[in-house]
Image (spheres, grey):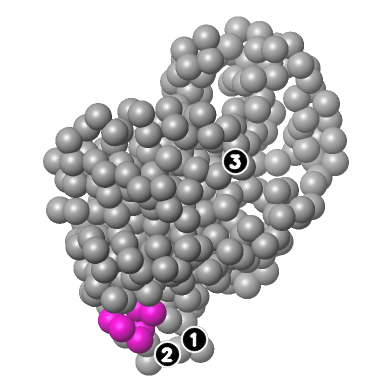
Amino acid sequence: MKVLVTGTAGFIGFHLARRLLQDGMQVYGIDNLNEYYAVSLKRDRLAQLQPQSGFTFQELDLSDRVGISNLFQQQPFDCVVNLAAQAGIRYSLQNPWTYVDSNVSGFVNILEGCHQQAIKHLVFASSSSVYGANTKVPFAEGDRTDHPVSLYAATKKANELIAHTYSHLYTLPMTGLRFFTVYGPWGRPDMAYFKFTRAILAGEAIDVYNFGKMQRDFTYIDDIIEGVVRVMLSPPQGVDSRLDLAEQPDSHAPYRVYNIGNNQPIELMTLIQTLEAAIGKSAILNLLPMQPGDVLTTYANVQALSEDFGFAPDTPIADGIVRFVEWYQGYYR
C-alpha cells in the first residue's frame, strides 16, 4: 500500500509516517518546511524517517498547483492523508493570507489530485476549533459548526464543506478528522504545553490566558495515530447520517467526519501542575485575559469513533506529559 502523507515533517505527519512504515507500507511524504517554527526540528523529524525503507520525501508546498498536479500524475497512491496546513490561531491575526493559501487553495489542489487519480480514500485533518462558539459539550459531529471564532477554524470548516462537495460530485471516499489538542514527543513548539515546559525549565514566567480558566481535551499523539490508521484503512461507503446535511438531503457521498479526542477535558491549571510534577520545578505564572480567537472549552464526544472502530483515545494526561518531558529534556539536553 502506497500512502501520500502531506505535512510529513510536521508533528502528526511525522508520527503517522513512522507508524505506516513500521506497518510495512510505502510512504511518500511532502512538506514545505516553512519557518512558522524551527525548521531544524522539522528536519530532525525527517532524519528519523529518511533512512527507512519505503520512505520517499519531496519538498513541496500545497499551494503549488502545478507541482501538486505533477505529483499525482507521476506517483500512483492508494490513499492520501492530508495533514499539511498552516496551524495556529493567534498567528492568523497577523498572517491571514497564509491560511487561505495553504489551508484552502492548497487543500483544493489535493482534492483535484485525488479526483485526477480516483484515490481510494482521502483522510484529511480538520480540527476541534470548527465547533467555535458552541456552548453545548461534549462536542458531537452532528452539532452546528457555523460559528468559528478564528480564521484557522474557518479554513478547517471550509475544508469539510469542500471535501463533501468533491465526494458528492465524484464519489470519492473521504473522511475528515477533528483533532482535539494533540500533544506528545516531537510536538509543536507553538503549543502551550511545549512553551510552558521551556519556560519552567528556564525559570521564566509562563503566559496563562483567561487567568487559567480554560479547559482543553488534550489527546496524546499515539492515540491520534491509532485513530488515523484505523480510519484510513476503512473508506466510507455512504454519507455519515450523524452530520447535519439538511441543505443536501439527497447527498449520497461516501463521506464521514469523526472527533478524535481524549473525551476528558483538563483545566489549564491542572496541565501546569502536571508539568511541574514531571519537571520537578514550579512554574511562574503571568495571568492574562482571554485572547482573540480562543475558546473556553474543547471536549470531544467520541461515540461515533468508538462505535465504528472499537477505539477511543484513553492515555491519561499524567502519562503523556511524562513521556513528552522525557523527550524534551533528551532532545534539547
| Residue 197, quarter of picture | top right
- Residue 171 shows in the view: yes
Q: Is residue 50 magenta?
A: no
The answer to whether residue 43 is above or below residue 119 is above
Residue 34 located left or right of residue 226: right
Q: Give the Cα distance between marks 3 and 1.
A: 41 Å
> Residue 228 or 114: which is nearer the viewer?
114
The circle on residue 249 is 2
Of the residues tagged 3 and 1, which is closer to the observer? 3
Q: Which residue is mark 3?
A: 35
Q: How far from the left and from the top, in percent, is residue 208?
A: 76, 32
Q: Residues within 10 Å of mark 1 (few under 14, many from 20)?
A: few
Marks 2/1: CA–CA distance: 5 Å
The residue beneath circle 1 is 246
Secondary structure state at the residue bearing disc 1: loop
Residue 280 is left or right of residue 187, and the answer is: right
